């Protein structure tokens, strides 16, 4: 690993100040991805700004018809939150299936969303539930946030402070997981609100995406039967040692049907 300076501010303003005054600083959340990347020498930041002491980034709140989750909230805290289990059970379930207990105790929602791993679970929740990503400078719609494989519209100095999830009328997240890492080979979030249905898929492509044909069919008739015969084109889907693009296309349909059948 390269040498770097380590900072642990207790206020958000301090973190912003360090990030803007250093040449090549990086934000550190749980380090589940970043530290491994540095050990492999794929990243060599001059400074690490650890957000772990900033208390305001760890809250889980219900605000009107939304659940607001601080960016430094761990997957274990999302999975165990009574508010989330009651208001958006699909989100608590999604968090409970990330990695193993050690990963869930340390990994954070902000780190996961900022990293935008193509097989990560939270991007499907952000896109599928129609969430907003809040940073120290702006609000970003989930529809605009993810821009490509491991890419988002975040600027280098920008800090995700929270994610705002509208409470759906019903939703479900189902994944076909890699048995070793538990990352999604395919994961599908289906969410119904008062006036629309959203279907977001992770694991199948280079970045999370919506399936408009499923959304239209489910908007007319929210039942697994209404999408059973709809096919997802396989041409742009991921093909690797875990699954072919044909198999992933098939899984998108099956996971979506299961999500519709279990939505609550
Ligand atoms: C063995 C293993 C199994 C895993 N299995 C799964 C799985 O099944 N499903 C799944 O979804 N994920 C899985 N993960 C990923 C894990 O859950 C973490 O979400 C992910 O590694 C990010 O980790 P972190 O929160 O510690 O962020 P870090 O590693 O600290 O940071 C990741 C990136 O995000 C940036 N960042 C962090 N916080 C912020 C912020 N607030 N604002 C702006 N940028 C920020 C950092 O600068 C860095 O670029 C697994 C990881 C491991 C190691």
Image: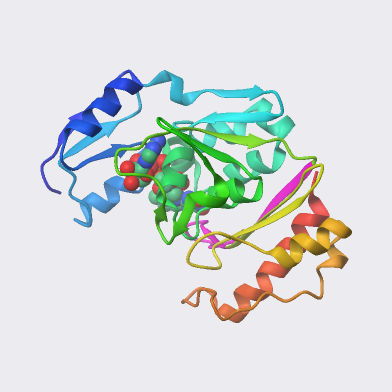
Image position of 122 (left or right of 137):
right
Residue 129 location (% of width, % of height): 66, 45
Against 142, residue 110 (above or below) is above
- Tell me which corner region of the image, top left, top right, bottom left or bottom right, holds residue 175: bottom right
Residue 134 location (% of width, % of height): 49, 34
Q: Which quadrant holds the C terminus?
A: top right
Instruction: Please identify the dominant SS of the magenta region.
Output: strand
Residue 137 location (% of width, % of height): 41, 32
The residue that appears at 56% across and 78% down in the rendered structure is 245
The residue that appears at 49% across and 49% down in the rendered structure is 145
Residue 264 visible = yes
| Nearer to us in this view, 13 or 175 | 13
The residue that appears at 45% across and 20% down in the rendered structure is 56
Residue 32 visible = no
Instruction: Give the residue at the far left of this rendering.
Output: 3
**Residues drawn in magenta:** 170-185
Against 145, residue 163 (above or below) is above
| Nearer to us in this view, 15 or 175 | 15
Q: In which quarter of the image is ligand 1?
A: top left
Q: How is the image coloured?
A: rainbow
What is the tally of numbered marks visible in this picture? 0
Image position of 152 (left or right of 166):
left
Against 98, residue 248 (above or below) is below
Residue 109 location (% of width, % of height): 49, 39
| Nearer to us in this view, 130 or 46 | 130
- Reply yes or no: does residue 172 show up in magenta: yes
The residue that appears at 52% across and 23% down in the rendered structure is 59
């Amino acid at each position: 690993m390269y040498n770097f300076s380590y900072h642990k501010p207790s206020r958000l303003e301090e973190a912003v100040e360090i990030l803007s005054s250093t040449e090549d600083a990086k934000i550190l959340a749980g380090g589940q991805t970043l530290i491994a990347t540095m050990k492999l020498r794929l990243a060599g930041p001059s400074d690490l700004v650890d957000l772990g002491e900033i208390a305001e980034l760890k809250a889980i709140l219900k605000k009107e018809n939304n659940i607001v989750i601080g960016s430094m909230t761990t997957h274990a805290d999302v999975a165990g939150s009574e508010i989330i289990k009651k208001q958006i059970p699909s989100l608590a379930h999604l968090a409970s299936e990330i990695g193993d207990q050690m990963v869930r105790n340390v990994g954070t929602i902000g780190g996961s969303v900022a990293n935008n791993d193509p097989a990560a679970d939270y991007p499907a929740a952000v896109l599928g539930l129609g969430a907003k990503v809040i940073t120290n400078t702006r609000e970003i719609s989930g529809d605009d946030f993810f821009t490509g494989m491991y890419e988002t519209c975040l600027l280098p100095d920008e800090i995700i402070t929270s994610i705002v999830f509208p409470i759906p009328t019903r939703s479900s997240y189902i994944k076909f997981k890699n048995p070793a890492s538990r990352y999604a080979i395919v994961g599908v979030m289906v969410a119904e609100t008062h006036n629309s249905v959203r279907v977001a898929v992770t694991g199948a492509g280079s970045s999370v995406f919506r399936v408009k044909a499923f959304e239209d069919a489910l908007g007319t008739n929210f039942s697994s039967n209404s999408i059973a015969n709809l096919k997802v084109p396989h041409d742009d889907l991921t093909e690797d040692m875990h699954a072919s693009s044909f198999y992933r296309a098939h899984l998108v349909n099956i996971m979506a049907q299961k999500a519709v059948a279990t939505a609550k």
